[in-house]
Image (cartoon, coloured by chain):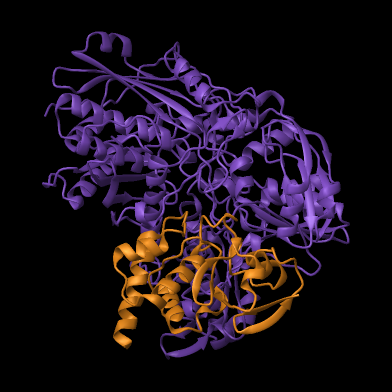
Chain colours: A orange, B purple
Amino acid sequence: MIPLEINGKRQNIDLPGETPLLWTLRDELGLTGTKFGCGMALCGACTVHLDGQAVRSCVTPISTAANKKVVTIEAIGNAPVGKTLQAAWVDLGVPQCGYCQAGQIMSAAALLAHNAKPTDAQIDEAMSGNICRCGTYTRIRAAIKQAVAKRGGAQ
Amino acid sequence: MSAPVARTTRLDAAASVERPLIVANVSRRRFLQGVSALGGLVLAVGYRSAGGAQEAKKYGADGMPNGWVDNPLAFVSVAVDGTVTIVCHRSEMGQGVRTGMPMIVADELEADWKRVRIAQAPGDEKKFGNQDTDGSRSTRHFFEPMRRCGAAARTMLEAAAAERWKVPVSEVEAKNHEVVHRPTRRRLGFGSLAKAAAGRPVPARETLRLKDPKQFRYIGKGQLKLVDGRDIVSGKAQYGIDTRLDGMLYAVVARPPVYGGKVASFEATEALKVPGVQKVVQIEDSPPPAHFNPLGGVAVIARNTWAAMQGRQALKITWDDGPNAGYDSVAFKTTLEESAHKPGKVVRNDGDFAAAAAGAARRLEAEYYIPHLAHATMEAPAATVRITNGKCEVWGCFQSPQAARDLVAKRLGMSADDVIVHVTLLGGGFGRKSKPDYAIEAAVLSKAVDGKPVKVTWTRDDDLHNGYYHTVSVEHLEAGVDARGKPVAWLHRSVAPTIISTFNPAAKNEAPFELGMGVINVPFAIPNVRIENPEATAHTRIGWFRSVSNIPHAFAVQSFVAELAAAAGRDPKDFLLEVIGPARQVSPEMLSDTWNHGESPERYPVDTGRLRRVAEVAAREAGWGKTLPKGRALGIAAHYSFVSYIAAVVEVAVDDKGMLTIPRVDMAVDCGACVNPDRVRAQMEGACVMGVGIATLGEISFKGGRVEQDNFNSYQVTRMAEAPRDIRVHIIPGDYRKPMGGVGEPGVPPIPPALCNAIFAATGKRIRRLPIRDQLKA
């Protein structure tokens, strides 16, 4: 049994320790907001937070997530930064098909949690691991900037 | 400027032109129907000779399987609490159709959008009309039927109110979710009228009163947020891969790595030892032609997807690769080039190319290569099937839910009436999800475990290894130009395996619908035009990919025009406009285009004025002619496809190491009137990024019959840093009374040539082979 804390809820998972967090979330726990895109940490669709850091859950075995705090897209709105990003995403109509956007928001939330005012280059760097096949990048960048502006105003 | 020749007659070249067969309105499904009905005679259904009875030819939505439906009882329901539910029967894959289509209904209905809910239609074309979400057709085919749906429902509510008040219906009017009695200002909410309205007869179509477009409150305003936006950003949105059912099992499939290959033998002992693996099932081989059939192979069914993937890795399979084991992209490029250097089937012939070229002041030629591409939807194909008590339920991300329904029924030996197909959101489509082979896989596997629900998930390597690829092509162009450099003779040989080969392996020529994507229907003011299509043999599954044949055709044509401009020492924008010629309406038939994107040639002539205008607007907005620093330059391209007109001006910056960045792109789009301008913009932005990816990175290549790319490390797509920094979309205002154009696809084709034309302007390097990859590196 592997102890996991997911979105504030502790639970023991009866799966081999090498099972990726992604498939544990999706298939065993029903948290399907975290998406499968590549299985090799190449596309970012599966991004979640592990103790506040953005990680690719498709290559994160549950054994390494044990006793750490996992936050997924389903709960990122509970954090002010996540909520602000979600609102900016909706406001600017960022999503097209929407499939990659959970991962995009998780990467953006981790960025803003550590860097309240990222430069364009820092945004590119932080988001470079997240592919959007619909090509919503200009709006993603605009939404991150809008969230930065909103949060700056609140400080 | 000399007066370009507006060609009003076309030589009757019956002797030299093999007249293309006509297809009324090619849908991906139409092929399949042809195949199933006629045992392989794909071309027999939907095609007939040009000399046939023209009056029977149907255009637009009329020509699609099961046409259109405008019955409000199918699409609209009003609950007693006033909630209006509108059915969206087209598949959402990012184009915004679940917002746009119901918006049309709600507007005519005078519904308050805040009280509207959207329901997704199952695959049922008898009830809803055609559901093949492809060809950039949803809005242009369903704008009018959806307006009538809303107007009919509104009329029923108004009649119910008039009856309640015992007043003439002419005195009442629906307004923002209420019906108002004008003389007395009495009001009744939609909810309180719901039951009475539902009992009213559906008004006759010809009696409906549609809004004056000036009265639209949602259509064209661009103020409504996406209906799925909140669910998407909070992880609640349901895609095909997200289906969860009680007792569900998870499967992945090992498919033959070579098209036409099959399992010679396999050993599952080790796979069955993997914890969580429950069963290994062989899926019957499916020799070419592929149709929409599964490729066959060996499936592993497990407790979760990971266990299934581990089990698959432990399978020992010996494949019999079959006749395509030698497919090699490097060698095939040479084969295509050899074909392109010899005359081929003549598919358009105006004037006399040979004579005009012989007499020209100068002759130029160029050849372009565009490789296979994979859709690589972020959500790879996924479907779930459950079979209980003689009924089958399917859940999945389908662009053609009726095809999924019919094919699952056929494979299971059931009636389609006993199969329900639930359509989820699609995590990208781009044409891949028009081919529901994955639904059939799930059905076969569910049956193998006594009808238990089974979800089949494709991994990324499955998606790249076993796709329906965009074709590969060599485009050979020659021109004879006059003393000023203006083309007087134009030859284009297009050589590419046809999509038809996926249905009929004997097919070696491009079909009318492929030729009508920017190779024959190029409305240039050139008197002598010869278009040839030498044969090409397919060695893999060729399928529709967003924008389809327009991608190679536009790349070649728009690059070549810029090459001619450079040879003439002319400004590329001015030269392009001169080659397009003066504003005029050209009949598609005069361009030997019998297809015309399935639309009526009278309603949808090729309008060079609109093509000119988008080029002019894009150039003006981009500041064409402005002074830029060294290494920076603009390039332009304009292309007509999916009955819309799009031009792009791309600004590139190339540093002295050959590093390419794209500071800005300006796109002008004339798609007629827009329902949701923000989504038109979004589609152009996305098309721009995809076009950049096709130009710079995208390539699927084969060696030993196998695809060489496995994942996003080897099949690269555009990421944020490489995407254009600034994409500005300029929408030409349209008239709601005029026919609409497509939006989802036509934005892609002008991007690669505009980009390469900009690179030429910046560096003097002409790109003729895509992707660019490291061709700019010193």
Seen from the viewer's position, the closer of residues B272 and B10 is B272
Inspect this view and state whether residue B164 appears. yes
| B397 to the left or right of B584 | right
Q: Position of residue B174 (x, y in %)?
A: 46, 78
| B578 to the left or right of B319 | left
Seen from the viewer's position, the closer of residues A100 and B353 is A100
For the N terminus of chain B, the quadrant is top left
Q: Position of residue A27 (x, y in %)?
A: 70, 67
> Height in image: B452 above or below B571?
below
> Height in image: B294 above or below B689?
above
**Residue at horizontal 25%, vertical 28%?**
B563
Seen from the viewer's position, the closer of residues B392 and A84 is A84
**Residue at horizontal 44%, vertical 19%?**
B337
For the C terminus of chain B, the quadrant is top left
> Height in image: B280 above or below B497?
below
| B481 to the left or right of B280 | left
Inspect this view and state whether residue B582 appears. no
Q: Position of residue B181 (x, y in %)?
A: 45, 86
Seen from the viewer's position, the closer of residues B283 and B275 is B275
Q: Position of residue B33 (x, y in %)?
A: 68, 38
